[in-house]
Image (spheres, rainbow, N blue to C red):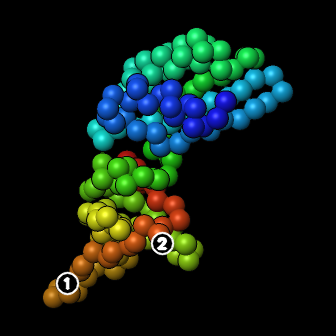
Amino acid sequence: MTKEKIIELITPFLEDDKFFIVDLKVTQTKTRTNITILLDSDTGIMIEDCASISRRLAHQIEEQDLIKDAFNLEVSSPGVDFPLTLVRQYAKNIGRTLKIELKDKTEKIGVLEALTDSGISLMEERKKKPKKDEVIEAIMIPFEEISVAKVQISFK
C-alpha cells in the first residue's frame, strides 16, 4: 500500500479541502501494515471527524482488498507537540508563541505576527525590557531557514 494510493482514497473524505493531511506514514511489520495519518483543518479538527474519515477509509481499503493481511489504521490530529509543517498550520497559529529552530541551529521564540508566501513575521521575545524610546520590530524568517517550528503552550 503506497502513500499515493492512500492519498487517492482519502481525498474524497477531506470535504473539498476543509481537512488537509499533515503527515502520512505507512510501515510494514512482519504481521501487519500500519497506516498513520495526521489531519488538520484551518479551524481545528474534532475526534468525530477523524473517526468518520478513518471508518470510511478503512471500508475503502477492505472493499478494494488493497491490503491482504491485517492492518492498523490510525487517523488523528497532529497534537500540540507536533511541529508545524504546512503554511496552513502557520496561518491558524497567528498570535500564538512559537519556538523555532533554524537550520543554522539558532533558536527563536516569539509571537507569530503574520505570514507571507515566503516566510513568517515573528515578534521575538526579549530577555531585557526595551528602552523607553526603543522601537521593537518583528523579524522576518523565510520558510527555507526554518528547521522545526512548534507552538508553545502557556499555562499562565
Q: Is residue 106 above or below residue 116?
A: below
Give the camera-side residue of 4 and 87: 4
Residue denoted by label 2: 145
The residue at the point 57 percent across, 37 percent down is 4
Task: Rate crowding at label 2 as few (under 14), some (14 to 19) or many (20 or more) other CA atoms within 10 Å.
Answer: some
Amino acid at dot 1: Val
Residue at the right extreme, as displayed: 30
Q: Position of residue 91 (x, y in %)?
A: 30, 53
The x, y position of residue 52, in whole percent, is: 43, 18
Residue 79 seen by the camera:
no
- Sequence-earlier tag: 2 or 1: 1
Distance from the alpha carbon under mark 2 to that under mark 1 = 25 Å
| Residue at x 58%, y 11% (from the top left corner) | 63
Residue at the image point whose x is 46% and y is 39% from the top: 21
Q: Nearer the viewer, residue 135 or 50?
A: 50
Q: Nearer the viewer, mark 2 or mark 1?
A: 2
Query: Which quadrant of the view contains residue 42?
Result: top left
Q: Which residue is mark 1?
A: 135
Q: Is residue 1 among what the camera can see?
A: yes
Name the residue nearer the viewer: 92 or 98: 92
Q: Is disc 2 placed on a helix, strand or loop?
A: helix
Under mark 2, the amino acid is: Glu
